Every structure is written in structure tokens, then in C-alpha cells.
Amino acid sequence: MPEKKSVYQNVIRQFNHAAEVMNLDPDVKEILSKPMNEIIVNFPVKMDDGRIEMFTGYRVQHNNTLGPFKGGLRFHPNVNIDEVRALATWMTWKSAIADIPYGGAKGGIQIDPRKYSQSELERISRRFAFALGSNIGPEYDIPAPDVNTNGQIMAWILDTYQSTFPPQVRNTLLHVVTGKPVEAGGSIGRNKATGQGVCYCVEQWAKDHDFDLKKATFMVQGFGNVGSWAARLIAEKGAKLIAVQDHTGSIYCKDGIDAEKLADYVAEHRGIKGFPGVEEIKNEDFLSTEADIFVPAALENQLTAETTGKLKVKLVAEGANGPTDPDGDRILQEKGIDLIPDVLCNAGGVIVSYFEWLQNKRSEFWDLEEVDSKLYKKIIGGYKRVKEAAEKYKVDSRTAAYIVALSRILVVYKERGIFP
Ligand code: GLU
């Protein structure tokens, strides 16, 4: 096995390249090349059998120039400070590209949540929120779901956070987390929002390239929230889902896989393995499937020097954060494969998080039509800015996305200056 690569190193390589192309102000470059705050908490939790186990949680706050820190919390065995730093930095770019008034943050706990009961997960989530204390807050740093976290976990975090305040002010704190269940103050459309954003971007790409989605085939890696919603929504546009991979294996069916049925199956069986009516293929053969569109929606560093050469697709639409490393990017360009980069393609989640936050602050409830049409406007606005920057600077779409983000943040540093 090759040594696991530093994800933050990827971010810095992408960042340095964009900074060089746009000739970024060296002072602003210096500031943005390090996260503002890095919080590590160790906390004890009582297990179902009465034992105490210690957990390590992280929250990295990269930048808050455009607004409060914002970003998800993930529960995964790979969570470490390097990964969280990278994910926090991507959140800063993502909010800036989507033109929403947030900075970037990310956090998580290094655990395999499958090993814990529901009541243990509740106590782990609550103790994590308690340990973070005032490092999060509705106008300061607002967590949301990410890999292996969901609305239920956000509801526990909200409840714990509120309980640390006097009863008179508790109802003013609803917007301390987003991605809550709708009944507990969440927004309609937040659950599918990241997949919806991926689908809007793919549709826009198809429009720009005179490409008929009804005749298209696509493949998806990862069938959690992002992958399963992207698959269902892209399939609704007439494209055929022909291959899927997740942590339990890879499946293929040239006549098409029913994304809706697969989502139901995964909800029950916790993975795609054993889904009836499809062919099981080897994991190493998955990436060489011939298809038009590939949506990586799992973890980082999937498209690398070793794997990217296998791809036989026209477009990679990144639902995950950081699925392609800089070598992977180079190979995509050499092969002429188009890319909708993560910081644009998967911004639908944080965009609808912003809508949820606004609704909470204003005690409003928007309907799905309103949420979806506003999401469309925001993400396609970002898509167009990235396309214009790619044309103007004659660069690939990831570099262009970075340039859009950095230009936006640069203006504010220039206007406000650096204290003192
Ligand atoms: N975790 C999601 C992301 O990576 C959503 C973040 C949010 O809604 O704050 O974009």
C-alpha cells in the first residue's frame, strides 16, 4: 500500500497554483495559507456496558472574513487534523464561490460509528458538542452534517448546546447547527441539497456542451447522502446509472440500476452488496467502466496518479470533497476529461444550510419550490463565475474556482485592512 497522502498538502498545491496564476497579493496569500484556529478536544463517554471510552474530536476554523465559520462534522476512522484542515479550507473557498456570507470550518471525531449503538452515538455527539462549548455558536461557527452524520446528530448537538444557556434565551439559538430534521427547525430540501446541486451543475454542463442527458450513462462512487441523491436526481433527468461503488463493493448493470430501489436497499442493508439483479464487479475494475459521467461522492484521494488513467468518461462531477489529487487533475486534463470541481459541484449542501439559517433567524418556513429555485440561482451563479474565470485566465476549472474564491476574499482584506 502506498503511504497515505496528506490531503492538506493537496489543498496547498492547488492554492499555490491559483495564487501564482492570479498573482495573489503575497500578504493575503500568507494569511490564507494557514487556518485561523485549530481545536482538539478529548472527552470521556459512558458506553452501554458501563465502561468509559475516551474520544478525540476536532474543529478547524480556517477563515471568517466573509462571515461566520461554517462546515460539517464527520464521524469516520480516517478523521485527523490534516484531513480536517483540508476540509475546513475547502469550505472557505466553497462559501466564497457560492457567494454566501460564511467562512470555512470543519470538524469531526475519529470513530467508526458502525461500532456503536444508537444511545452511545447520542452520548458521543452530545459530549462532543459540550466539549466544543463556545467554540461553536449561531453567529460564530455553525456545524452541519457530513460523512456519517445526519439530522438526528444535529438535533442532539442543538439540544446540548441550548441546554448550556438559560431557558430565556434557548429559543434564539436554533441556528447553531444546520441540516436539522425539518420538525426540529431544519429546511425542506436540505437533505437532498448536495445531490441536487450536483445535478444542477451536471445539467448546466450538458446544456453548455449540447449533450443529451437522456442518452447519457453515469457511475457513482459512494452511496451515502450525496451519492444516493445525485444518482436519483440525475436518473430523473433520463440518464442511466450503470455502475456504483461503495465500502461494501462494486456493482454494474448495462441496462441501468434503479437508483431509488438501491437507496432503499442501502438504507436497510448499510451498503450496496447483495443488491439483486446486477452484476458484482471487482473494485479495481469499477473506474474503467465506460460511461459518460462519473460522480465521485465518497472520500478524498480516489483519483490519483495510479487510478485516474483508468477513467473512460467525459465528465467528472465531484460530489465528495477532495476526491481528486493534483496528479489526478493533471491526468484528467491530459485525457481531456471535463471537471466540475468539488468546491463548486457539492456546494448545494452549504447553500441550503444558509437558507435554513436564514429561516431560523427570521422564524420563516420556505416551501421546496422556493428552496430549490434559490439553490439553482446560487449554484449556477457560481458555475458561471468559474466558467468565466477559466476562460479569462485560460486555466482548468479547479484553478478557476480557486481564483473566484480568492478574488472575493481578497477584496474584503483590501477594504478592511489588517488590525492593528
Ligand atoms: N458538509 C457539507 C459540505 O462539505 C455541508 C456543510 C454545511 O452545510 O455547512 O459542504
Image (cartoon, rainbow, N blue to C red):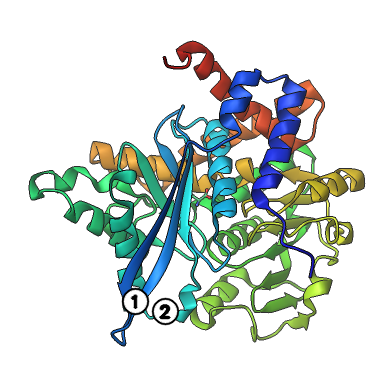
Name the disc covering residue 138, or none: none
- Residue named by callout 1: 120
Q: Residue at x 72, y 42 (%)?
A: 205
Q: Is residue 174 visible?
A: yes
Q: Amino acid at mark 2?
A: Tyr
Q: Identify residue for label 2.
A: 116
Residue 17 placed where, x, y %? 76, 32
Mark 2: secondary structure: loop
Q: Is residue 233 above or below residue 10?
A: below
**In the foreground, 365 or 312:** 312
Q: Is residue 81 above or below residue 140?
A: below
Quadrant assignment for the C terminus: top left
Does the residue at mark 2 contact the one at mark 1 (Cβ under 8 Å)?
yes
Place residue 298 in its image quadrant.
Answer: bottom right
**Where 226 falls versus 207 (above or below)?**
below
Q: Residue at x 64, y 60 (%)?
A: 299
Between residue 302 and residue 151, name the one nearer to us. 302
Res 136 visible: no
Does mark 2 have its CB less than 8 Å from ligand 1?
no
Going by the numbered disc 1, the residue's amino acid type is: Glu
- Farthest residue toward the left? 168
Q: Position of residue 222 (x, y in %)?
A: 63, 66
Q: Position of residue 144 (x, y in %)?
A: 41, 52
Compared with 55, 41 (above or below) is above
- For label 2, count other residues whose C-alpha is less than 10 Å away and answer few (under 14), some (14-19) or many (20+): some
The percent coordinates of residue 103 (x first, y second) are 47, 35
- Name the residue: 31% across, 36% down: 139
Q: Nearer the viewer, residue 191 or 77?
A: 77
Q: Secondary structure at mark 1?
A: helix
Quadrant of the snapshot with the N terminus: bottom right
Q: Residues within 10 Å of mark 1 (few under 14, many from 20)?
A: some
Query: Viewed as shown, does residue 9 lie left or right of 291?
Result: left
